[in-house]
Image (tube, rainbow, N blue to C red):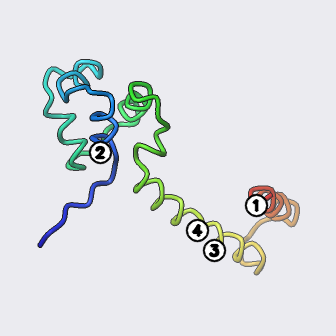
Amino acid sequence: MTYHVTQNHIRKHRKRTGLSQGDIATLLGYRSHWQVSRHERSDAMPPLLTALAYQVIFQVPVSVIFAPMHGTALKTIERNLADFERALNSGGARLSPRSIAQKLKWLKDRHA
């Protein structure tokens, strides 16, 4: 059996509001519901402005509406930050000591 993994919770929040895909499309300025349907199925990624519009419509943060993608982004950035910190600490970065210290402080402040 094949499962379609959705990368967002647009449908869940739309259903919670009682609005149809056509209603949402109208609010977003689309002429048809098909684009909302594509967003719900994760067949198309909404542009940033549209994602922010979903946030306004549902009164739910974008990071919640797009929680699966947010989780992926979070894991990726955390891994990249760890690599970045290792590179700074190893001296492999061709930066001034002041610049390295500033970046390491920024990394430390992120965890505080």
* Nearer the camera: disc 3 or disc 2: 2
The Cα atoms of the two marked residues, 2 and 4, are separated by 24 Å
Q: Residues within 10 Å of mark 2 (few under 14, many from 20)?
A: some
Residue tagged by mark 4?
80
The Cα atoms of the two marked residues, 2 and 1, are separated by 31 Å
Q: Amino acid at mark 4?
A: Asn
Residue tagged by mark 2?
45
Q: Nearer the viewer, residue 80 or 53?
A: 53
Across and down, in percent, residue 94 comes to 74, 70
- The image quarter containing residue 104 is bottom right
Q: Amino acid at mark 2?
A: Met
Q: Earlier in the sequence, mark 1 or mark 3?
A: 3
- Cβ–Cβ under 8 Å for marks 2 and 1: no
Q: Residues within 10 Å of mark 1 (few under 14, many from 20)?
A: few
- The image quarter containing residue 111 is bottom right
- Name which residue lies at 47% across and 35% down: 60
- Cβ–Cβ under 8 Å for marks 2 and 4: no
Quarter of the image where the C terminus is located: bottom right
Q: Residues within 10 Å of mark 4 (few under 14, many from 20)?
A: few
The Cα atoms of the two marked residues, 4 and 3, are separated by 5 Å
Across and down, in percent, residue 74 comes to 53, 59
- Name which residue lies at 18% across and 34% down: 35
Q: Earlier in the sequence, mark 2 or mark 4?
A: 2
Across and down, in percent, residue 2 comes to 14, 69
The Cα atoms of the two marked residues, 4 and 1, are separated by 15 Å
Q: Earlier in the sequence, mark 4 or mark 1?
A: 4
- Cβ–Cβ under 8 Å for marks 4 and 3: yes
Residue tagged by mark 3?
83
| Residue 2 position (above or below residue 27) | below
The image's mark for residue 111 is 1
- Horizontal relation, residue 97 to residue 75: left or right: right
Q: Amino acid at mark 3?
A: Asp
